[in-house]
Amino acid sequence: MPCIRQLIVFSALFSGLLGAKASDPVDAFIDDVQTVTYDCPDPSQYDQLESYLSSDTLSAAQRFALSTEKSHFLLCRGKTAEAHALLFDLIDQDDVNTDSYYYASAIYQVGFGYDVLEEPQRCDYYAQARELSSPEQHSDVFLSASLGMITNCMQNLPLNERLGRMFRVLERYSETDNHAALAHIHNSIGLVYGGLGQHVLAAEQFIKAHELGLESYTGSNQLTILISAITSLLASGQFETAYEYIVEFEKINRDVATPLTNFYYYHALTGYYYRTNKIDEMKNVLPEFKRTADEMSNSFITAMASWYSVVPCVYEKNQACMREYIRELENTGGKGANRFANNPDYLALKTKMYLALGDLSQAEIAFDNYVASAKQDFQNDQDSASILSAANLYSQINTLESEIKATRRTRNNIIIFGLLTSGLIIALSVYFIRKRYMAHKSIDPITQVLNAETAMAKIGKHDAPARGRSHALALFDVSHLRQHNSVPGFTKSDYVLRKIAAALQSVTRDSDILGRYGPEQFIIFLPNIEEQGSKAFLDRVQAILSASFIDDDGTGAVNVHSSISVFVSTDKLNNLDEIVQDMQIS
């Protein structure tokens, strides 16, 4: 699935026009419709805005303000070209008040429009918008422009410095209750991670932004974050979680249904079926995907729809359909498709397509490009410590290499040797990456102890204890944490869970098994221990968990209470799941 630029998340805040509220109904409407840069205006106000713009009695300042808000509406609807045309007419006027909020907003929106198109001009306009604003004046423009620059215009800076700037912004806003701005910041951090191929980390940030946004956003404002989360989940192989959010997206979109959100939905659903090889289901939704893509009038989106449409043809070896797609590429000169020309998924499909057509020379070119692209992706993954997505490419590389070898057995042995060598290098790289990934997969990301699945698997492997000894299984339920989950920014609940995990690790033996079993539960397994020894150990743990944890920033204590359920056995713990369920009930 190609990685498309997601729209930066919009909030649901409103700020007043500079100066006092005016009695003029036009000024009153401007006050009401004005929306910060990371928000989408209320769709119900669009007709009224158009009505005012058709009046001949507007002042120059009123027309500029209303036209800027109209461009905001257009961007939210995915009509980037129309918004740009309007914005350029505005900022090119003579005698424009460059100190006004609406001028700064218009400059930012031009940059945002270029951002949607992934054009480098965005950086010039983001920089200009930032200079026209400050944290005190036009603060929403300043925040959006700053995040846009860090996300898209500072790739030459070391990664730690870019993220450091992001988290400094996050830290500043974490002290406020501005959930909409916090969601905007987390979304931007997700975009940085996504640009590095860190799709797992990106998905975490997008989901956090979505959860924060639920307190502020309605309608399309929720959907712009949600599509980012879905895209990252699909890219990182978390297909079922992605599907759950696709279902949520569809429910919200029933009341929104703009051309842009409709396209997002069908793009996500088609991508899910593509990634999971559900070709029949994919064929069923492709007509709607193509229809919504056509409404966007964007060459990149149109090319993407054509790519997805040829997928069933390749799987079904429909030569007429594949040849028609190739003719279409030739006729358009690859317009739009050049944006994903180096995408490994696309190159893999082209390899399969040319093999099915019997065009071995083009298949070899596509495969060589695929190998080069995959190797570059692997290198980027390692450079940024992103190892999770590499596993998804592992089986695909082997599959493609086998197909190439099967087709080319009668060809020149030198060519075969070259392909095998390239494939071997990649396979070895993936082997070590995958090995690191499997180790990482067993760890709970918040507490850094074993996750529930891994802990239960390790416990289940233990045989019966030695004579005169027992196995002790303890389930700790930590309470009073959920009340802290609404704290914006870095949640106190995560902080306390990490402190608890560290405390438990400090008292466990090397042979003990410690894991996070549930959101507020830890499980400890003490193998081959004397009964008195297990009781003393559990008493120590209970004392630790009953303590108070003081936050590092001095914001106060978080009281932590816990309950404990213990199971002691002199036999192997068969039916472990049932035992734990009984412990939870108790």
Image (cartoon, rainbow, N blue to C red):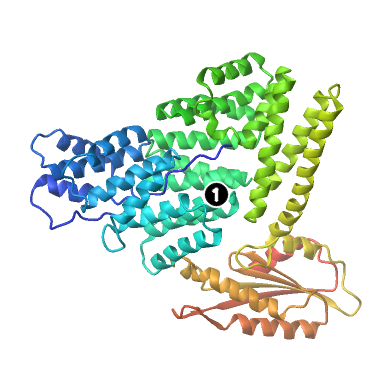
29 above or below 564? above
- x and y percentages locating residue 524 in the rendered image: 72, 72
Residue 58: x %, y % from top left = 11, 40
User: Which corner quadrant of the image does residue 131 belong to?
Assistant: bottom left
Q: Quadrant of residue 351?
A: top right
Name the quadrant containing residue 459: bottom right
Horizontal side of residue 459 vs 246, given as left or right: right
**Residue at image point 56% right, 37% down:** 2
Q: Secondary structure at mark 1?
A: helix
**Closest to the observer, 479 or 86:** 86
- Whether 46 is drawn above or below 429: the answer is above
Vertical comparison of 168 with 557: above or below: above
Q: Which residue sits at x=53%, y=45%?
A: 230
**x%, y% of residue 184?**
41, 54
Residue picked out by circle 1? 194
Q: Residue 6 location in percent, x, y?
A: 46, 43
The amino acid marked with disc number 1 is Gly
- Give the left or right position of residue 455, taking residue 75 as reference: right
